[in-house]
Amino acid sequence: MRWMSLLAGLLLVGACASGPGEAEVVSNATDQALIPAMTGAAEAAGALSTAAFGFCASAHPKAHEAAMDAWNRAKEAWEASELTTFFGPAEMLRTVSKVDYNPISQDEIDALLGSDAVIDAAYVGDRASSVQRGLGAVEYVLFRDEAEAGEARNCELTTAAAEVIADATRALQEAWVESFDGGEPWADTFTVTIPSNQALGDLVSAFVETTKRQSLFELGKALGISAPQPEIEAIPEGAAGAAAAMYRSQLVGIRDALAGGNPDSLGGLIRARSAEVADTIDLLLEQSIEAIAALDRPMRDIARDDPERLVPIYEDIAELRMIFEADVVSLLDITLGFSDTDGDTG
Amino acid sequence: MSAVLVRVPHRATTRVSAASAALFRIGFGLVGLILVVRFFENGWIDTQLVDPPYHFTYPWLDWVKPLPRPWMHLHFGVIALAAVGVTLGYRYRLSVAVFALSIAYVEAIDRALYLNHYYWMVLTAVVMVFLPLHAAFSLDARSGRVDASFIPLWVAWLLRFQVGMVYFFAGLAKVNSDWLLRAEPLSTWLPARSELWLIGPILTLPVTAYLLSWAGVVFDLTIVGWLSWRRTRPYAYAVLVGFHVVTWMLFPSIGLFPLLMSLSAQVYFEPGWPERFRRVAPAGSPSARTRLSPGWVVIALGYVLVMTVIPLRHHLIPGDVKWTGEGYLGSWQVMLTEKSSSATFIVTDRATGDSWAIPPPQYLTERQRMVMATDPVMIRQTAQLIAEDMGGRVEVAADVRISFNGRASRQFTDPDVVVSGPGRPPVSAFVVAQPST
């Protein structure tokens, strides 16, 4: 009887002392960050599609402005949900290929516009190449003066691509919350079926990939830090000049998934293991989000004219990547990627 | 002293039942077979051996390359056949020799795939070639290719050494401040198992990591003694199996190690213990004595000496093996370190002096990238690889940060030291000293 009491006591103390459970953390991140982000992306993409049809029906300058605003909102919402493209149904649904493949090919889009093809949603979704569609293609044909943007072929591509984007973002959201591939919703798979530690690994892998791409492959190259010479075009920015909003949204997506203020969140779990690491992540995220929000010109312009202004942002994001890759991986005892192999490496 | 010199050889040449040694052979062969099945089932032959365009190499073994896909699959088929031969004791010496060579070849392909128990299997298979483990429970014995069901006692001793060294040196390696005073890496690992039924919440308690750390070191350092003492042997073996079951439950990725050691440790029982379950007495007479060839004595003692020195060699190298990795291979540092790292390489164009940072090559596998970034030798190989990829016109330094046994991440390599040079700079030249905290 004494042993039973002792065991019960230990279980109770353990349950109280450990911070949030991993399953709870994954569930909270899914319900409070990932699904709302995907829902937001689907809604904003739907609004873009509506605005694109509205503009092409009226060719009115205000409708053009409304369509461009809708594009900006759709882009931001999509980037905020980008974490969900690194794992789960997105690969099978080819979501990125339909919504925001980067880089697009302006030459191939011009070739499509100059062809005899009937540009409708079916053609864009099934037959057009990834480099001819998605938000990048819409940006390319929409962000011109309204007369040119309203030309018939441009409008055909704008409306068709916007419709494909809306369908693809909705399909991803439905795969998470309703059913994926005829089975259970992927949210259930993510929060219940697969081990929580692996789900955490998926999330942190997405953090690492996002910050690595932003720092080493884009900003770093543009600033000549991760390339022999500055490569301004490494920043994925088109006519809308939306790179800053894109980076900011991606970092906000990470911040929302961490939800550091909530003790039952991923950020809370990290804090339970190391307050120092949690504080550093919070600080770097806030710092970089604020610094990016303060940028008042397209990032390519800043990289060309005033690159020093972007260096602190690069450094903060590079630091974030290292903390996710080294500290967080260690604190949560997770494996990045899917490199299963036989046995210990200790 | 002289009495010992007489008595030990006398005891060593005493003929004893081969039953326990034969069970060792059967267990080893079965695990070898399971290993092959796991490689086929999980696709590791392709993903780990055939597909990667680059493999990290061991010193002097950089000529070892993977076979083309169909031949590599065939090679694993050969390993499976050899494992079956070992299990059944059919053409035993040929089977175990083929197994040893085949598995050694696989292990030599990529340093990033090093595992302590694969290394042990290679060593053991090589040793087994010279031991008559087919004297019982074998097709060779049944067909008359072996003349008796007895082995000299020294064979059992050598098998016990082979098993015991893993525990003893693993225990010795645990005698360090991280393990004993900080309960690391268990303090990091156990909370991640908080969802285990019933015991999950207990695993998150700091005291649990300390208790298990101390229990682990006591177990490793003393289990050979308890197994060797007749009175405690059955209980010790039960504890050993329980220990391995628990470690397997807590750390499923540990793979075949628990099964391998649980099956092998039975060699500490009396050599004839399985005979109790046989109706027919073994053929031949145990009273006879075998001849002890001086040459084999020297080889056996030499092997024991080498296997004792290899795990301890890192003490002769400056720095902590867990941090520098120097002297790690073969030192039975089993599950002693939790390292996660972030690696970037600094490339400098020799002609222009321009420097820039790049990530590890994308064509390395996830596992290669992960293991490489914690191992200075592989970091150096990666730097050399990058330099070769860029036509040799650049110098490459490594900027690696590591989180080590629950500590906040810190600089691991000096980003100002070129490591891609032809002279292979020593690890101490580019790995920064381990911080004291």
Image (cartoon, coloured by chain):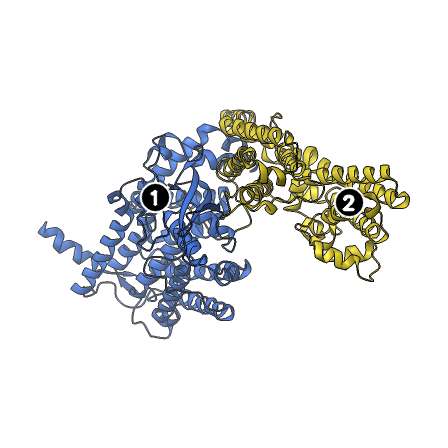
> In this rendering, is residue B89 above or below B367?
below
Marks 1 & 2, CB-CB < 8 Å contact: no
Residue nearest the observer in this picture, B341 or B102: B341
- Label 1 residue SS: helix
Residue A194 at what x, y percent from top left? Answer: 62, 44
- Label 2 residue SS: loop
Q: From the image, state the color of chain B.
A: blue
Residue type beneath disc 1 = Phe
Describe residue A243's horizontal placement relative to residue A68 as left or right. Answer: left
Q: Does any portion of residue A265 appear in the rendered image? A: no
> In this rendering, is residue A276 above or below A41?
above
Residue A131 at what x, y percent from top left? Answer: 70, 54
Q: CA distance from mark 1 to mark 2?
A: 54 Å
Residue type beneath disc 2 = Arg
Residue nearest the observer in this picture, A296 or A23: A296
Q: Chain of mark 1?
A: B
Find disc 2 in the rendering and name its residue.
Answer: A144
Label the yellow chain with its letter. Answer: A
Describe residue A6's horizontal placement relative to residue B119 as left or right. Answer: right
Residue nearest the observer in this picture, A69 or B339: A69
**Furthest-left residue in this view:** B2
> Which label was assigned to residue B430?
1
